Image (cartoon, helix red, strand yellow):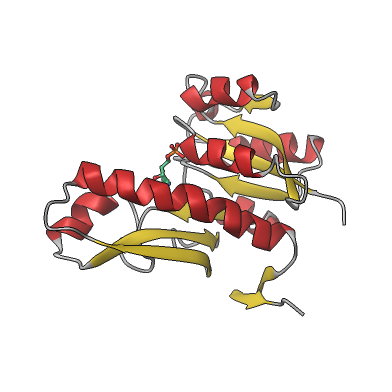
């Protein structure tokens, strides 16, 4: 089976992007990273991707003002021009409209630093501590129009320590993220996991 062509969408430092690029170097990994795309020209991850020899592109959302769909049309065109099969959101800080999400349904995945459906949205580590949660972690899921709500592909948890601050917890969760995002992408790229009728279907036959 040919490797799936993957684009990683970032807005910042790109540590999950680096983990995906590293995993995709393995000969038998079912995906290749064909593009790193940022909505911010100053995203630190762009230089890290270039250093790895990966094509990069910037679609600056500020150039589109309030025209969200115009921004997403530009994203969509950039992805099509590179014949992208799958899109990984990795710290991509723009909400995507149903227009874009429907076009990439089943081929668009995201990582969220919490045990979804708990703690959707931002500041997950602070909120998990404030809520007195026992467990916390990270989730890779298919993207659906409603934010942080698609079916889970891989989730891994840790126990919150009494000594954890939001920062230490973020660092511990990030280690999980770097492990499970490559696993989840491999599951989707190999066809073992699919989103069908809004649910995750697993087939290892
Ligand atoms: C990660 O915690 C990810 O889960 C969240 O944003 C952060 C991005 O970090 N969506 P990085 O850019 O991958 O280092």
Task: Residue 63: name its quadrant.
Answer: top right
Q: Is residue 29 visible?
A: yes
Vertical position of residue 69 compared to residue 61: above or below: below
Q: Quadrant of ligand 1?
A: top left
Residue extending furthest toward the front: 27
Q: Position of residue 60 (x, y in %)?
A: 55, 26
Front-most of residues 106 and 191: 191
For the N terminus, the image quarter is bottom right
Side of 103 relative to 146 (left or right): right
- Residue displayed at 63% across by 32% down: 36
Q: Position of residue 123 (x, y in %)?
A: 26, 48
Residue extending furthest toward the right: 1
- Residue displayed at 23% across by 44% down: 168
Q: Position of residue 22 (x, y in %)?
A: 61, 38
Front-most of residues 5 and 74: 5
Side of 44 relative to 104 (left or right): left
- Residue displayed at 77% across by 45% down: 27
Q: How many marks?
A: 0
Vertical position of residue 129 compared to residue 32: above or below: below
Vertical position of residue 26 compared to residue 148: above or below: above
- Residue displayed at 63% across by 38% down: 21
Front-most of residues 110 and 64: 110
Q: Is residue 106 visible?
A: no
Front-most of residues 161 and 88: 161
Side of 65 relative to 195 (left or right): left
Task: Residue 64: name its quadrant.
Answer: top right
For the C terminus, the image quarter is bottom right
Q: Position of residue 38 (x, y in %)?
A: 56, 30
């Amino acid at each position: 089976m040919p490797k799936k062509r993957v684009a990683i969408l970032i807005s910042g430092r790109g540590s999950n992007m680096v983990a995906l690029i590293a995993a995709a170097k393995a000969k038998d990994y079912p995906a290749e990273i064909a593009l790193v795309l940022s909505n911010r020209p100053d995203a630190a991850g762009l230089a890290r991707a270039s250093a790895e020899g990966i094509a990069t592109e910037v679609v600056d959302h500020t150039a589109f003002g309030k025209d969200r769909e115009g921004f997403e049309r530009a994203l969509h065109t950039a992805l099509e021009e590179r014949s992208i099969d799958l899109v990984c959101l990795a710290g991509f800080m723009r909400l995507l409209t149903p227009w874009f999400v429907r076009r990439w349904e089943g081929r668009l995945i995201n990582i969220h630093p919490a045990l979804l459906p708990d703690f959707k949205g931002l500041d997950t580590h602070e909120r998990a501590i404030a809520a007195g949660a026992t467990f916390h972690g990270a989730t890779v899921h298919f993207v659906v129009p409603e934010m942080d709500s698609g079916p889970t592909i891989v989730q891994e948890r840790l126990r919150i320590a009494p000594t954890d601050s939001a920062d230490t917890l973020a660092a511990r969760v990030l280690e999980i993220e770097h492990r499970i995002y490559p696993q989840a992408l491999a599951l989707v790229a190999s066809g073992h996991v699919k989103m069908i009728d809004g649910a995750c279907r697993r087939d290892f036959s």
